[in-house]
Each structure stands twice: as structure tokens, then as C-alpha cells.
Amino acid sequence: MERRLFVLQRLTAVLLAPLVLVHLGLVLVAIRGGLTAAEILGRTQGSVGWALFYGLFVVAAAVHAPIGLRNILREWTPLPRRAVEALSAVFAALLLVLGLRAVWAVVA
Amino acid sequence: MTDVAGARAESGPGELEVRIWRGADDGGFTGYRVPARPNQTVLDVVTEVQRTHAPDLAYRFACRVGVCGSCAMTVNGVPRWTCRTHVRRVLDEGTLTVEPLRNLPRIRDLVVDMAPFFEKWQAAGGVFEGTATRAEAPARVDPESAGRRAADAGIECINCAVCYAACDVVAWDPAYLGPAQLLRAWTLVNDERHAARRETLDRAMGPGGCASCHTQGSCMRHCPMELSPTEGIAGLKRRSLAAMFLGGNWLGGG
């Protein structure tokens, strides 16, 4: 289990690195270009590409962050092991749900 | 909490003031004064305190020449071998503070219980299992092979617990096996004579294992034998990944 989580965290990090850079680039383009919300939605709505890009981003983040948080909770709080596992799982579910809802909101 | 043996409030020239931890967890520091000699080690100072001021001071040492690792203590906040620590090199604004090693239960004064250190050593898969008997010839291991060189880089560990005391993850996570323990596992994973190489690898990567290491490198920084548990742990992580993806072919070099 520890090994699997370790590998998943490292693999999702490999995925997230380029995704984050692209996302930051997009943010810069949108702001510099003075894009309005309507203009952005005009580009994302109905787009399978954006759905896949941000869908993958959300899934990777929902796997990566809670694994790290799990370690932090274990090292810095007096919480018992089961509570740490539960909180991390809840956080993962939260990121997944909120993230996929957001993706749906801009591509649907 | 401080009680200084000696009449004067300030230590005079030619005198060294040292604060030593007395008692266990509920103890405190006591100050002592000993003559400042040109070539004294911290172990010399502790011994002089025990002989002249505090006959009931509990501390460990054996060889006193830097080969056994028994005299490891925390000196001015740093875990070191006291017999290999010259006072003049570590004086912090003229003061010397000596405490027991961090991360191990305190028994009394400067003595800690090494049992948890060795229990974790076993839990990390450090017990060697042979594959041959005395009836067979000794194994012919190529000393230049990648595996043997990796093992040789770690086998000089004498289990002094300095790395264990230096490690912040050990301090934060009671389940973490520890640097010396994982380095030992690494030497066995690379030992072609060891019968349980895969099991040792799995233990080293399991709960409390090397996935918890944050590669801060305190172990490598403080090891008196100049070993690198950091490197061994990185090797375990790599080899564990290989085991996960290559299955039976995980016994690659490095």
C-alpha cells in the first residue's frame, strides 16, 4: 500500500508538471488577452479537448495532493492512523467532486 | 534548575563550564566546571565530571577512540561521538551542553534505550537469511559487481544511532523505521546470498518505510562513518519501482 501510494504520487507529479505549466500559460493568455468569461466559455463549451485536459488535471490532483496531505497529517498532528487515512480519503473525494463539477461547468 | 559545583558565579580562565542533562524525561540541566585543557574531547569532559563532581552520572562509552559508536550523545544540539569531538571545535560562545541522543527513550542522564532502534532494524528486514550450508563452498561474489558495491557502501554501519537521532522524520513519525535500518535493508537487498531479498525490499517500502523519507539528508550529514542512508533509501525507492513494474526482473543493478 505504501509503495503503491508512493508510486502514484510520483507518477501524478510527472503528469501534473506539464499540466500546471500549460494551465498557468492559459491563465496568462486569458488575462493578457482580456478575455471575458463569455469569451472563455465560448471556447470551452462543447470542447472534448478541454474536457479531457482539465478532467485529467482534476483526477491527477485528486490523487496527488491527498497522498502528500496524508504524510503531513501523520507527521504534524497527533491524529490516530485511521483518522489520517479517513481525512485523506475524504479530501481526495472532495477534490474529485469539486474539480469535476467545475470542469463540467465550463465544458457542458 | 542549574546548580554549579564550585564557589564562583563566573568560570575563571582555564575553566570550562558544561551543562549536562541529569535525570530522565522529567530531569533538567546541571552545570559543572572542569579545567579547560588544550586537547580535551567531550568524552574527556563528561568522564572528568563523573570522576570529580558527580559519581552517579550515567553515560556510555567503550573504545574512546572512535570505532565503536557507544559514546554518541547530543552536543550543543548536534548528535555526535563524544570521543571524536574536541571541545574547542564545538564550544558555542564558551558553553558546552551535553544531552542524551534524540528520538530514543531516556533511561537516565546521558543513557538512552537502544531497544527501539534495534527492533526497527529487524522490522525493516535487516536479518540475513542464508541460502547455503557449511557443506557448500563459500559464495563467490564479485566485489566489483554493482550489487556488491552498493552493499559495500553501507555495510560499515555500526548502529551508533547518530543518524536516527539526527533524522527529523523519526522525530515526527514514531512508525518510521529510520535511516540506519533502511540502509541495512538496502545492503541486504543487494546481497546476492540473502534468501529474502524481495521480502526485505517489501518491508523497507512498507508501512513506516522509505516512502516516508523526505530526503532532508540529516543522516548523511551526521554519520560518523560517512555513510549515506539517503543514498540507500533512494536506491530502495528505485528498486521498489522496478519491482513493481518489472516483476521478476527487478534484480537489476543499482
Image: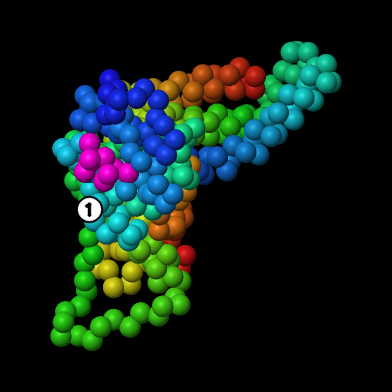
Task: Give the residues drawn in magenta, as a range.
Answer: B45-53
Of residues A103 and A89, which is closer to you in this image? A89
Q: Nearer the viewer, residue B235 or B179?
A: B179
Q: Examine the rendered structure and indicate whether residue B88 appears above or below residue A53.
A: below
- Quadrant location of residue B57? top left
Q: Position of residue B33 (x, y in %)?
A: 33, 34
Residue B225 image point, x, y percent: 40, 58
Q: State left or right for residue B122 relative to residue B213.
A: left
Is residue A42 rendered to the left or right of residue B137? right
Q: Is residue A20 depicted above or below A27 in this figure? A: below
Judged by its main secondary structure, the magenta piece is helix
Q: Is residue B188 magenta?
A: no
Return the x and y of residue A73 as percentages of the image width and height.
Answer: 38, 26
The residue depicted at 40 percent of the width and 80 percent of the height is B142
Q: How is the image coloured?
A: rainbow
Q: In the image, what residue occupies the spot 22% across and 74% down? A: B131
In the image, residue B68 sits, relative to residue B172, either above or below, namely: below
Give the percent coordinates (x, y) of residue B216.
48, 42
Q: Which residue is mark 1?
A: B122
Residue placed most toward the observer, B50 or A56: B50
**Which chain is home to disc 1?**
B
In which quadrant is the N terminus of chain B drawn? top left
Kindly state the secondary structure of the residue where label 1 is placed. helix
Amino acid, disc 1: Gln
Estimate how packed mark 1 is, as few (under 14), some (14 to 19) or many (20 or more) residues with alpha carbons within 10 Å: some
